[in-house]
Amino acid sequence: MEPLAERLRPKTLDEYIGQEHLVGEGAVLRNMIESGHISSFILWGPPGVGKTTLAQIIANKLDTPFYTLSAVTSGVKEVREVIEKAKGNRFFQAASPILFIDEIHRFSKSQQDSLLGAVERGIVTLIGATTENPSFEVIRPLLSRCQLYILKSLEKKDLEKLLQRAITTDVELKQLDIKLEETAALMRFSGGDARKLLNILQLVVEAESSKTIVINDALVERRLQQNPLAYDKQGEMHYDIISAFIKSIRGSDPDAALYWMARMIEGGEDPQFIARRLVISASEDIGLANPNALLLANAAFDTVMKIGWPEARIALAEACVYLATSPKSNSAYNGINSALQLVKQTGNLPVPLHLRNAPTSLMKELGYSDGYKYPHDYPGNFAVQQYMPDALTDNRLWHAQHTPMEEKQYQQMLRLWGERYK
């Protein structure tokens, strides 16, 4: 027989639990589904909150071809085959066939590129599901063609509603006399993951021989300790754990950073995911205060790719401790954010003539590159000249944070530019 989580998978929006901000009365996804007109979108949220279920509800509701791919098992070849099938199933003004890709963050850039044309031309309507931040894992051209909807971990009231539905409506469980005396342990171990909650419930019930089962915290803890792998450890990665990990590094607490990293490792997290977060932290939080941090984080990432598990955990731990104990600076992070904001505000300002390239005689006649000072021709390999657009000559974007390493860079700028950096 199917697992309990599959038996209870909702078939309609009225059976769907949680995510009221998306599927409640008048909410955006409900309106879209009920209208029958679906645009491409990506569902982002932790495991077990209903991403795949929503896609299946759409498949049941709409009268249009529906294709499913898993990024774990499918490559560019499978994507192209589905797109060709979709072309053959597109009739005149009928809605585009829907392509659902589970774990789309696992698709490589080339695999995601292979989807672009079909999504852009309306050959397929894409629905993607991901547990990872799409800003990091989905290529920008594809992300720009999709709406992004964020699903939240299920709240306690949602999980309690799901438990009641399970014991009163499931074909197997309703034959038993199940009493929910305590649910705190069920809630704690499930972590807002509906699938994990139902897996735990099924484990506890199947371990009892009597038809009358009283579920309390002690029983749940005892059963999980006896069989700790019976529930979905892959769902252990929560955004609050990775947040605690990054904030512990930022806060210079190596003990806490190692603890949260161990939580991710023990929860079955992909080592590459941890390594990527270390690289991001080295750039964002340590930055110019210790440029070697980025080198070490990249070396740890490289070790993960070359050596694999379990030995790679040592390289990750080394990078984790090094980052946590390094001095901190986010001046480069702030600088690029300020620069991006300035570009959005000021648009495409012209490049000063003396900085322009002059590969042709016409460009030279127009003054391109005229007056440019080649720094290496001057004492100290530096010459004062304008590098910003004319309208932005007074703008400062990088502001040093005076760690020992960055102070040297700041003093160098003072020597070269004087008042500009005071």
Image (tube, grey):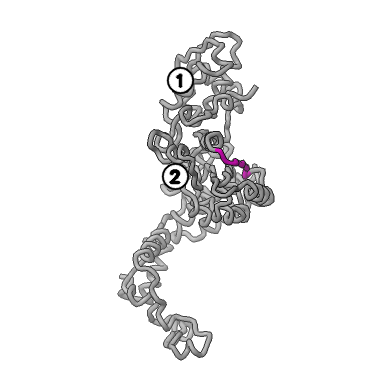
Give the left or right position of residue 134, taking residue 301 as reference. Answer: left
Q: Quadrant of the image for the N terminus?
A: top right
Task: Please determine whether, in this image, residue 135 is positioned above or below residue 335.
Answer: above
At horizontal 38% and vertical 79% (from top left) the residue drawn is: 386
- Label 2, label 1: how many angstroms apart (C-alpha)? 31 Å
What residue is pinned by disc 2?
248
Q: Which of these two is toward me, 247 or 148?
A: 148
User: What secondary structure is marked by label 1?
Assistant: loop
Q: Quadrant of the image for the C terminus?
A: bottom left
As for residue 173 lying within the magenta part, the answer is no
Measured as percent of width and height from the top left, residue 396 is found at: 34, 68
Callout 1 amino acid: Thr
Query: How many residues crowd around disc 2 within 10 Å: few (fewer than 14), some, or many (20 or more)?
Result: many
At horizontal 53% and vertical 54% (from top left) the residue drawn is: 142
Discs 2/1, front? 1
Q: Which of these two is toward me, 193 or 280?
A: 193
As for residue 69 lying within the magenta part, the answer is yes
Which quadrant of the structure image shows residue 6? top right
Callout 2 amino acid: Ser
Residue interval drawn in magenta: 63-71
User: Which disc is residue 19 wearing?
Assistant: none
What residue is pinned by disc 1?
183
At horizontal 43% and vertical 63% (from top left) the residue drawn is: 405
Query: How many residues crowd around disc 1 within 10 Å: few (fewer than 14), some, or many (20 or more)?
Result: some
User: What secondary structure is marked by label 2?
Assistant: helix
